Image (tube, coloured by chain):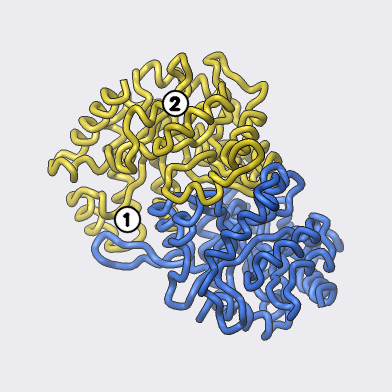
Chain colours: A blue, B yellow
Amino acid sequence: MHAADLLQASIDRTRSIACVGLDPRPALLPPGLISEALKVHGDTAQGVAAAFLAFNLGLLEAIAGHCAAVKPQLACYEAYGSAGLKALELTVVRARELGIPVIADGKRNDIGSTAEHYAQAFLTQAPGLAGSAIPGLGADWLTINGYLGSDGVTPFLGKAPTGTGVYVLVKTSNPSSGDLQDQPQGEGTVAEAMARLVHRWGAGRVGTCGLTDVGAVVGATWPAQARALRALMPDTPFLVPGYGAQGGSAADAKAGARADGRGILVNSSRGIIGAWQATKTADWQAAARAALDTMNQDLA
Amino acid sequence: MHAADLLQASIDRTRSIACVGLDPRPALLPPGLISEALKVHGDTAQGVAAAFLAFNLGLLEAIAGHCAAVKPQLACYEAYGSAGLKALELTVVRARELGIPVIADGKRNDIGSTAEHYAQAFLTQAPGLAGSAIPGLGADWLTINGYLGSDGVTPFLGKAPTGTGVYVLVKTSNPSSGDLQDQPQGEGTVAEAMARLVHRWGAGRVGTCGLTDVGAVVGATWPAQARALRALMPDTPFLVPGYGAQGGSAADAKAGARADGRGILVNSSRGIIGAWQATKTADWQAAARAALDTMNQDLA
C-alpha cells in the first residue's frame, strides 16, 4: 500500500491526526518502571533500555486506536547504544502488531550509496553474508534532511513492498531554525527552495488519497510560513512538530492543512507521554490516553 | 585536550592527513571472515556484525600509526540494527586503545533538546536511572548537519572532559550537492551561508594548533569551492570526503588547506578497506596498509 494511503487510512480509522512521540528519557519514567528495571539490570544502559521498553509497551497499549501514528525519536534510544536500539526495535514490533504506523524520527542524510544503508536500516532490509535479506527496523516513514540534494533522497523512495515514505525537513520548529532556513534565496527563502525540491521529489508519487510519499516537516511554531509552504507543496503530507510543549496552538498546527483538511499529522511527545507528571497521577497509561483525547478534541 | 589539538597531534605523530573510513559492507568482506561468521552465527544480523567487527579489528591493527584518524560510517552499522551497533561500539573501543582519534560519521541534526541526546550518544554520556552516567560511543568527533541552525549545534560543542568536536556539512562531495548548496544566497551560495554560520559557531574556540573544534565537511570533488570556502572559514578544520573512489585527486583534496598546510583531513574508505579486492590479494590487512601508504605518499 502507498505510504500516504496507509497513513490516511489510519487517520480515517482513528479519527485522529495526532502522532504520539515515543521519546523516552529517564526523567519521564514512572517510579515503578524505574525500580523494576534497577532490580533486574542495575543502573546500566540495559536497565534504561528495559524501562524504556516497558514504558513504550504500556503507552502503545493505552493509545492504540486513538492516534494516527507514533514517532520514536531515535536520539533518545541511541543515547543508550545498542541496548537502547534493541528497545526501539521491540517497540516497533509491538506498534506494528497493534496496526499503528511508525515514523522513525532520525533526520538521516548522506550521499547516495550511504543513504541506501539508512534506507535498509529503517525502511527495508539489508543483504546478509550468504544471500539472506535481513529485515531493518520496519518503520513506515523516516524523517530525512535534504541538504545533500536529490541523490541523498532518492534511495529512500518507494522501497518496501508495502510502501514507505519520508518526511524531509523544510521549516523546523526550533527557535534558531531561521539561521539558515529563513535566509533569502531567489524570490523566497532557503526553506522555500527546499520546499520546491520536496515538491519535485514527490512528482508522480501521489497516492489515491491525493498525497505523495515525500512529505515535509513544517513546525507548528511558524503558521504563516506553513501557509506559504503549502502553496509550494500542494500534495505533500506535512509532519507538524512543535504543538503543545514547544508553543504551537491547534490553529497554528493546522495552518498548513490543505483546503480539504488533509495533509497534516500533528506530533506531541511530552504532552502525552509525560502527562502523568503534569497531572500528578500514578496511572501513567490513563494519563497518556486522557491527554491524547484532549489533543484530539483540540485538533478536531 | 582540545579536539583540534588532539587531531593535530595525531597528524604530527603519524605524519599523515589520511582518515580511513571504516564502512564495512558484506560485499567488501574477505571470504575467510564470511565463512567464520556464518559458521558461528548463520546468515543473520549477528553474523554480519561479527564479520564487520573482525574486519575492523584487523584493519585497525594494520593501519594504526599510519593514519591520523578513522571514520566509521554509522549507516553501515545501523543497517544491521542493534547487532550492528554493538560491532561499532567494540570497534571504537579498540581504536581508542590504539590511540586513533575516531570521527563518528552520523550527520546528526535535530532541535536543541534532541541534539543533546545525540551528543550523549556519540560524544559524552547519558543519565542512568539512579544517578549513574552511562558512557556513549566515545567518539572524538561527530559529523552533523547544520540545517536547523544554532540551537541544533551548540549542544554538541565542548562537551567531554577531553574535548570533542563536530564537522558540519557545508559542501558535500556527491553529484547533486548543488541542488540546495549551490543555490544563490545573498552575495554567494547556500553553502557559503552555512560556512558563515560554521565560522560563527567556532568563534572563540581555537585550540593551540590554530584550528577550532567546529569543523566543516568540504568534498574533494569541488576544489574551486573549497578554496572559496577556506576564505570564509580561516581557522576551521576541514574533513574532506570524495578522494579516490568518488573522483577527487590529491590536489583537489588539498585545495582547501590553509597557507600553513594545516586544516585538512582527507578520507578514503573503499580505496583502503577494499584494496584487497582491487589488488586481488588474499592478505587484506597488508593490502589496506599498502593502499594507505600510497595515499599518504600521494597527499604528501
Which of the chains bears the disc numbered 2?
A: B
Question: Residue A124: x and y, percent?
Answer: 43, 67
In which quadrant of the rendered view does residue A49 lie?
A: bottom right
Name the one closer to the observer, B171 or A165.
Answer: B171
Q: Which mark is residue B264?
A: 2
In which quadrant of the rendered view does residue B59 lie?
A: top left
N-terminal of the two: label 2 or label 1?
1
Q: Is residue B24 visible?
A: yes
| Tags 2 and 1 both on a single chain | yes
Question: Residue A24: x and y, percent?
Answer: 66, 57
Quarter holding the C terminus of chain A is: bottom right
Vertical side of A277 occupied by B165: above or below: above
- Amino acid under disc 1: Val
Q: Which mark is residue B48?
A: 1
Residue A74 vs residue A253: left or right?
A: left
Vertical side of A96 occupied by B116: above or below: above
Q: Residues within 10 Å of mark 2 (few under 14, many from 20)?
A: many
Q: CA distance from mark 2 to mark 1?
A: 33 Å
**Label 2 SS:** strand
Q: Residues within 10 Å of mark 1 (few under 14, many from 20)?
A: many
In which quadrant of the rendered view does residue B266 lie?
A: top left
Total numbered labels placed on residues in the image:
2
- Residue at figure coordinates x 54%, y 52% from the top left: A46
- Residue at figure coordinates x 54%, y 68% from the top left: A202
Which of the chains bears the disc numbered 1?
A: B
Q: Which mark is residue B17?
A: none
Name the one closer to the observer, B147 or B112.
Answer: B147
- Amino acid under disc 2: Ile
Vertical side of B158 occupied by A130: above or below: below
Residue B144 vs residue B45: left or right?
A: right
